[in-house]
Amino acid sequence: DTEVTQTPKHLVMGMTNKKSLKCEQHMGHRAMYWYKQKAKKPPELMFVYSYEKLSINESVPSRFSPECPNSSLLNLHLHALQPEDSALYLCASGLSPALAGAEAFFGQGTRLTVV
Amino acid sequence: KQEVTQIPAALSVPEGENLVLNCSFTDSAIYNLQWFRQDPGKGLTSLLLIQSSQREQTSGRLNASLDKSSGRSTLYIAASQPGDSATYLCAAHGNQFYFGTGTSLTVIP
């Protein structure tokens, strides 16, 4: 199983809502990533988890709150978002952030629209 | 900070042509380089992974090369098909994956 599963596929939320994005993998990967991608731009790193601990936070606003409850699951909690946060949110996993040869596997993303 | 650039930004070719996509990176201290394909509104599909110690990798009609010392990688697509139309991204793997700016490929039937 080389799949990273993201749910939901699409999400529309108001600026006062609280919602969560979910990412799951069963490949035994201990590094998991959240990326944000705007239209016609490359993905931008948001967070990196290594062995269930947050190792990189790319100065992401606090309205985005990541959580890694176990080695297979990664959540992104959303609260009080702005319309400019509308984007494709991609989750990825790999063996380890610093392990040579670690291939990254990406999910299909969650298309988020903030209204 | 690692910077990854892809040339050209967009490419349109007739079906059957062989083509080369270019990726350059500024910091040669990478673990590997990975090429991805992305269809509109979709996630990333891994195409090829080249370890830092390797020079090239092949999968079907795709061949990717890596020259770490010069900070360059190329993706060669042989006998292009309309189904190859997509955006192609390279990513240099350091302490995170640094993505290139992408090449949007259109193969005309």
Image (cartoon, grey):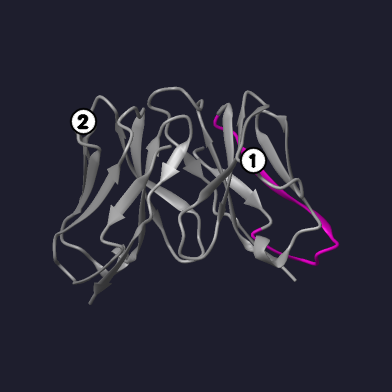
Q: Which mark is residue A24?
A: 1
How many circles with numbers are drawn on the protein? 2
Q: Residue at x 35, y 46 (%)?
A: B4
The percent position of residue A63, horizontal first and vertical second, equals: 77, 50
Span highlighted in magenta in the image: A9-27
* Neighbour tally class for label 1: few under 14, some 14-19, many 20 plus, Cα within 10 Å: many
Give left or right: position of B86 versus B24. Answer: right
Residue type pointed to by label 2? Ser
Q: Nearer the viewer, mark 2 or mark 1?
A: 2
Q: Residue furthest front?
A: B1
Q: Chain of mark 2?
A: B
Secondary element type, mark 2: loop
Residue type pointed to by label 1? Glu
The percent position of residue A109, horizontal first and vertical second, equals: 58, 54
The percent position of residue A103, horizontal first and vertical second, equals: 42, 34
Residue B25 within the magenta-colored segment of the rendering: no
Q: Residue at x 80, y 67 (%)?
A: A14
Say which of B73 and A91 sits in front: B73
Residue named by callout 2: B69
Residue B108 lies, with reference to residue B42, above or below; the image says below
